[in-house]
Amino acid sequence: MVALAGSASLGLPLLSVLSGTANAQNISNPLPIPELLENLDKTGKSATFAMDVRPGNVEFFKSKQTHTLGYNGNFLGPTIRVKNGQRFRLNLKNNLQEVTTLHWHGLHVPAKWDGGPRQPVPMGTEWNPEFTIKQEAATLWYHPHAMGLTGSQVYKGLAGLFLVEDEVSDGLDIPKTYGVDDIPLVLQDRRFFNNGQFAYVQSMHDIINGVVGNYLLVNGTLKPTLALQKSLVRLRILNGSNSSIYRVSFSDSRSFQVIASDGGFLESPTKMNSILLSAGERAEVLVDFSDLKKGNEINLHVAQIQGKRFNAMTIMAGEQSKPKQAIPTFLRQFDRTPASSASRVRRFNMETMGGRGMGMMGGRGMMGGRLTINGKRMNINRIDEQIEAGAKEIWEIANRSGMMMKMPHSMHLHDVQFQILSRNGQPPQPHEQGRKDTVLLMPGEVVRIIIRFGDYKGVYMYHCHLLEHEDDGMMGQFEIT
């Protein structure tokens, strides 16, 4: 029997982990498309929704029921779609046996409705955020963000997409029929015990390296099939994993056009045949499948930089559809913030310090190495940075993981979108030149970003979006005054 690394020394149960070759119950299922959450305002003037957070069960493997969490269902949540300028309202009921939150990842939102660890929703209570959507079309997402519980709750299934549309997205001649030629793909790897339960056990190794799985779920399903109905398809890809970094490509190495990053459309499409996404990052791509004949199949490949390569999804060509569709050469005007306009430069060192004295404490508050930003771990009672509303700042972020603990980190900022000015002193690649809210930093990398802080005042978070790092304290707070 193969035990989890480090589990015996931590007093954790010696349960064996599925090897990655077990047959999935849903192996031949069509790709499930998360349903669009019903707008309760039938006039469409506002965006008014209701959701509950609940426990559930999913049979990922035959005769094995996995205990899960979901929004309005057993696993994951519905897609919320809104318009720029709409008034947004939500009634959220927490039916879990523990506290949770609901964070709007990538959304410009008042601090009191951010859904971070400062806005807990205790079990058995409701939360009713209300605010106006104030940003351009983008593929965003939502997930829990309770102190020390983010990783475990996301792992069990709490996540969903949040789509903002505007007059530009409405007017572009690109695929936009949700679930037909505009396809959401939530990519998440998982690890399972032999009894079918998620193997989310925070050994010291798991905290330092992140929990990396040996099975890949696409929209909550193992190895689904997407039957194409159109020749040109728009894929909205979310790396919804806890800590894995994915390189996404196709089995035939076909190229695609990247049209959007975290915060919305690029100025113009950029051609690639693979894209690297860290946990929490998104990309929208256009893929032309007009060369495929009925019955042809290709696979979507998802490779963890941490090691495993998945045939994540089968793409099957259906009846020949409309002729090859032109891809726009221009998407939208991008309002860049010049570096010369910044009033201040702040520096952030993301550090992983292992070695002698690195220990472990049981329960939630576990400690592995010291995962810090500027030498500090998260303290909800401390404000780390104070920023004036409307300020423009450069943040220089460095991955200074220790000699023996070299590992990736990322930086995610709540409330704001930013531009990448440079990566290791060089201009960012074209697909990283749009609006971003999460940026990957490989060991030794230094990234400079420029941020325009908006009109909302209050306290927000910045943190590593490897969720095990975040939960262990690699997070700080900034206050807009």
Image (cartoon, grey):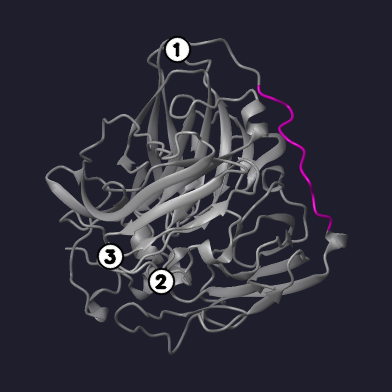
Q: Amino acid at mark 3?
A: Gly
* Residue 361 location (% of width, % of height): 33, 84
Q: Amino acid at mark 1?
A: Lys
**Residue 401 at least partly seen:** no
Mark 3 and mark 2: Cα distance apart in space: 30 Å
**Which residue is nearer to you in this view: 139 or 350?**
139
Q: Give me the residue at 51% from left, 38% from top.
A: 236
Q: Amino acid at mark 2?
A: Ile
Which of disc 1 and disc 3 is earlier in sequence? 3
Labelled disc at residue 293: 1
Mark 3 and mark 1: Cα distance apart in space: 53 Å
Horizontal relation, residue 412 to residue 316: left or right:
right
Which quadrant does the C terminus fall into? bottom right
Q: Is residue 377 above or below residue 126?
A: below
Q: Residue furthest bottom?
A: 357
Tag 1 secondary structure: loop
* Residue 168 location (% of width, % of height): 68, 33
Q: Is the stretch drawn in magenta largely helix, strand or loop?
A: loop
Extent of the magenta region: 327-338
Q: Is residue 461 above or below residue 177?
A: below
Q: Which residue corresponds to mark 3?
A: 124
Question: Mark 3: few, some, or many residues within 10 Å (few <14, many ≥20)?
Answer: few
**Residue 366 at least partly seen:** yes
Mark 2 and mark 1: Cα distance apart in space: 46 Å
Labelled disc at residue 134: none
Q: Residue furthest left?
A: 63
Q: Which residue corresponds to mark 2?
A: 207
